[in-house]
Image: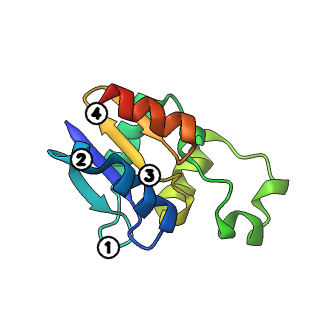
Amino acid sequence: MRKLYYLSTCSTCKRILNDVGEQLAGFEIQDIKKKAITGEQVDQMKQLAGSYESLFSKRSRSYQSRGLAAKTLQESDYRSLIMEDYTFLKRPVFIVEEEIFVGSEAKNIEKLQNFL
């Protein structure tokens, strides 16, 4: 399976998709704003990533505005928040067979490109 979860309005996601370019052939691409992620999809990402926290974006505007930085969040909280608001999913998320690449960090995107 080759799957990409991203946000079409995110300039960083757009740049990464452009950088990956032709290597995206064969990927099922899902804009998480237009088509919400399901619980099953989040659970699959967690299985590959190891935790819901690793999928969670602490850079989301909602993270600060809701005062979540001051709270101690559990795995179930991270999952609930990701399901509640797509901006809490760290983006982009690439799933290639049994490997997952989460987020926009340069080293992560380099690993992805080398893997592809």
Q: Which mark is residue 44?
A: none
Marking on residue 96: 4
Q: Is residue 30 left or right of residue 52?
A: left
Q: Secondary structure at mark 2?
A: helix
Helix, strand or loop for disc 3: loop
Contact, mark 2 vs mark 3 (Cβ under 8 Å): no
- Mark 2 surroundings: few (<14), some (14-19) or many (≥20) residues within 10 A: some
Across and down, in percent, residue 106 comes to 56, 41
| Residue 100, image quadrant | top left
Bin the neighbour count of mark 3 within 10 Å (Cα to Cα): few under 14, some 14-19, many 20 and up. Answer: many
Question: Residue under circle 2?
Answer: 24
Q: Earlier in the sequence, mark 1 or mark 2?
A: 2
On the rendered image, what quadrant is the N terminus found in? Answer: top left
Picture residue at 48% right of the left edge, 41% below the top: 102
The reply to whether discs 4 and 2 touch (Cβ–Cβ < 8 Å) is no
Where's residue 72, x and y in %?
A: 78, 46
Task: Tell me which numbered mark, 4 or 1, is placed earlier along the sequence.
Answer: 1
